[in-house]
Image (tube, rainbow, N blue to C red):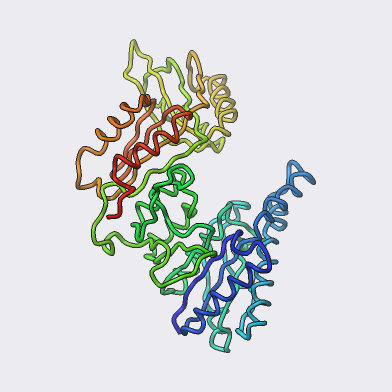
Amino acid sequence: MPVLVMKFGGTSVATLDRIRRAAKRVGVEVAKGYDVIVIVSAMSGETNKLVGFVEETSPLFDAREYDAVVSSGENVTAGLMALTLQEMDVPARSWQGWQVPLVTTSQHSSARIVDIPTDNITRKFGEGMKVAVVAGFQGISPEGRITTLGRGGSDTTAVAFAAAFDAQRCDIYTDVDGVYTTDPRICDKARKLDKIAFEEMLELASLGAKVLQTRSVELAMRYKVKLRVLSSFEEQSDEAGTLVCDEEEIMELNVVSGVAHSRDEAKMTLVAVEDRPGIAAGIFTPLSEAGINVDMIVQNISDEGHTDMTFSCPVNQVARAEKALKAAMEAGSIAFSELVADTEVCKISVVGIGMRSHTGVAAKMFKVLSEEGINIKVITTSEIKISVLVERKYMELAVQALHHAFDLDKAS
């Protein structure tokens, strides 16, 4: 039988009624002739509650025990989903990560998937099981300990299973009905996309769009897994949602497909750094070792042997970044006259594969922001993306203006 992977996020399984609704969707696909692998998240709010228990019990917790606790939410959902399907006379059973087994690295709380052997589940399908309900977000390390894949890891679990089982498609059920040209909460003219290319979705996910986890899109692109993003709360058709696929499957590529934003950014500048070989490594190595997620980087023109180095990072990592850089200066590996942190900025990005073959996108973006009186602090570009840092108070205005300027409110 062909295999279909269906993933249900926390809001989709938040109550027993919602689990029943999700189970009915699974039953429809079974009736179509699929063997179905269902990946479930913990019920909405459950993981946060479990994390709170761990932190209250042990502020400097053992990451192995953290994983043992926070992974339990998915186990509950998997069992309840399997029971619900059984009540519908659909042959189903639940699987925890170690039972598959989903083998991961030993990096607790942020493990990466190494292997998903298909033998156990395939054998059960052969014996008459129609639905394997798998607890998302979790696996087992080479040492035999439970691991978790990081927040949002159930998306990654789903795509990995779709790749391992050569599934026809991976459907991600969530509380939105697809991928939009921008955040509908900010721009009421945001439009749902019927299709979006893997690369565009990867950029949007990494730039602040919350629909899919970045690692899941990376996996889907690498293994050519067709992803469909759907709402759990609306009636479905075969054309519902947004299909994330190869760009070759999209008839006409838009110059710009979406506008993304990331609210909680910070801009940090090292003033009067020595301009010499190795200084960049001296700055960014300690930041990397401190776990700082550096994004945009700009170096000024040298003046009398000194330069300024600016980078962006999440605003909640500013204190750690300051500590790491001051420690590096005390150790003598770098020197600077001042460290300036601006925590009132946001990142605005336009994304589109069509940029590869069209000129003038950057000029148009900068002109639009200028006409709205929005000053650009930092710019970075790639083949299919242009990002800027601006004052956070202008975030909604910038998103709305760019969305309109690139005609994203009009159906293509």
Left/right placement of residue 234 relative to residue 106 reads: left
Residue at the spot 65% in from the left edge and 70% down from the top edge: 78
**Could you say which is closer to the camera, residue 285 or residue 14?**
14
Placement of 283 over or under 82, stated as above or below: above
Of residues 258 and 404, the one drawn nearer to the viewer in this rendering: 404
| The quadrant where residue 11 appears | bottom right
Residue 144 is left or right of residue 275, and the answer is right
- Determine if residue 98 is in view: no
Residue 143 in the image: x percent, y percent? 65, 61
Q: Compared to 384, does 266 lie above or below?
A: above
| Relative height, residue 254 to residue 101 (above, below) | above
Extreme residue toward the right, this view: 57
User: Horizontal placement of 169 versus 82: left or right?
Assistant: left
Q: Nearer the viewer, residue 354 or 75?
A: 354
Residue depicted at x 59% and y 28%: 319
Q: Position of residue 145 (x, y in %)?
A: 67, 61
Q: Nearer the viewer, residue 261 or 40?
A: 261
Residue 397 seen from this side: yes
Total residue callouts: 0
Residue 386, given in percent of the width and then of the height, sits at 33, 38
Q: Residue furthest front?
A: 188
Percent coordinates x, y for residue 148 in the rendering: 62, 57
Residue, far bottom = 127
Q: Residue at x 73, y 47 (%)?
A: 52
Residue at 46% across / 20% down in the picture? 270
Quadrant location, the C terminus: bottom left
